[in-house]
Amino acid sequence: MTGEAKQPRMKVLCMGMPRTGTMSMAQALSVLGYSNVHHGLKMIDNNHQWAQFDEIAAALMEGKDLTQQDFEKIFSEYDACTDMAAPFGLDIIKAYPDAKVVLVERDYGRWNNSIGMVFTTLFGPMSYLSIDCVERLIGSKAGPACRKLMLHWGKTTSSKDLVANLQQSYERHYREIRAGVPADRLLDFKLADGWAPLCEFLGKEVPDAPFPRTNEAKELQRVIRLKIASNVGIAMKLLVPFLVGGIAVGIVYTMGKSWQ
């Protein structure tokens, strides 16, 4: 006899784009009792999960329709998600029809200034070394997954088009979610409003603590620097045997020539 399908844990989808206070939202949801909240910085060293992100983003870029089962490969152990889940947009919202949606929008000009480091890391001149060379060498999926996810979000296959049309993509993201989610399932939320509207929407008691406010930009810069340094260190360890072998061959060849 077939057992009942396992019900997903996902209860809250925070669909504000990365760099719109997603760390503050993740901390706030944790304070409210959501035991496991997904955020990109928490999975920075989880290559298995990055590989799943890469697989889903690639499927979406190919125009495939994804189901809850597909997203559960990543989110089955989470009660809520923020940050990296947002670029999935309506695809993930439709996959979790019982989850409530919280939407945090930042002024585009300020968001654009803040997100610049992310796009430089993914598509800037140094990305050829850090992603195309180093990450490929060590088998990391983080950079490739982020690239695919943002290109899918921008509805393009060109990084130049993505950057050129960034404002249109940003505005479309929020417009589509507001149009596609029933009013009783959606909260347009401002961090400055604090606990009251969020707790009312989620049916939670207002905590006796300040609403979390974190310096997301500073933490993101720190984590990215550490990740790149770690990747380069791993790559160098992989290359050492080849470098040593090459040097040894060169020495033997040079000595052989000198004995002739």
Image (cartoon, rainbow, N blue to C red):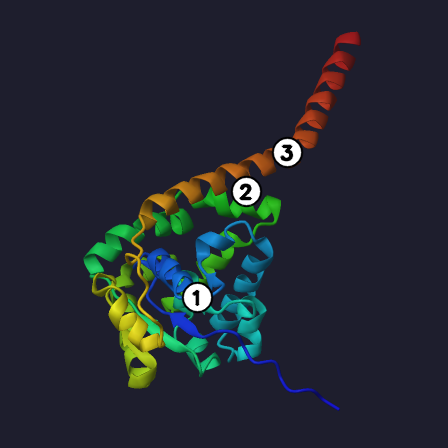
Question: Residue at left 36%, top 66%?
Answer: 154
Mark 1 belongs to which amino acid?
Gly
Mark 2 belongs to which amino acid?
Val
Q: Quadrant of the N terminus?
A: bottom right
Q: Is residue 134 above or below residue 86?
A: above
Count numbered badges in the picture. Answer: 3
Identify the residue position indicated by label 2 in the image.
134
Q: Could you say which is closer to the camera, residue 198 or residue 188?
A: 198
* Of callouts 3 and 2, the N-terminal one: 2
Identify the residue position indicated by label 1 in the image.
33
* Of callouts 3 and 1, the N-terminal one: 1
The residues bearing labels 1 and 2 have C-alpha atoms spaced at a distance of 39 Å
Q: Residue furthest bottom?
A: 1
**Callout 3–callout 2 Cβ contact below 8 Å:** no
The residues bearing labels 3 and 1 have C-alpha atoms spaced at a distance of 42 Å
The disc label shown at residue 237, or none: 3
Question: Residue at left 33%, top 50%?
Answer: 216
Q: Write down the quadrant of residue 19 in the picture.
A: bottom left
Left or right? Give the position of 88 relative to 241: left
Relative image position of residue 70 (x, y in whole percent): 56, 74
Relative image position of residue 242 (x, y in whole percent): 69, 32
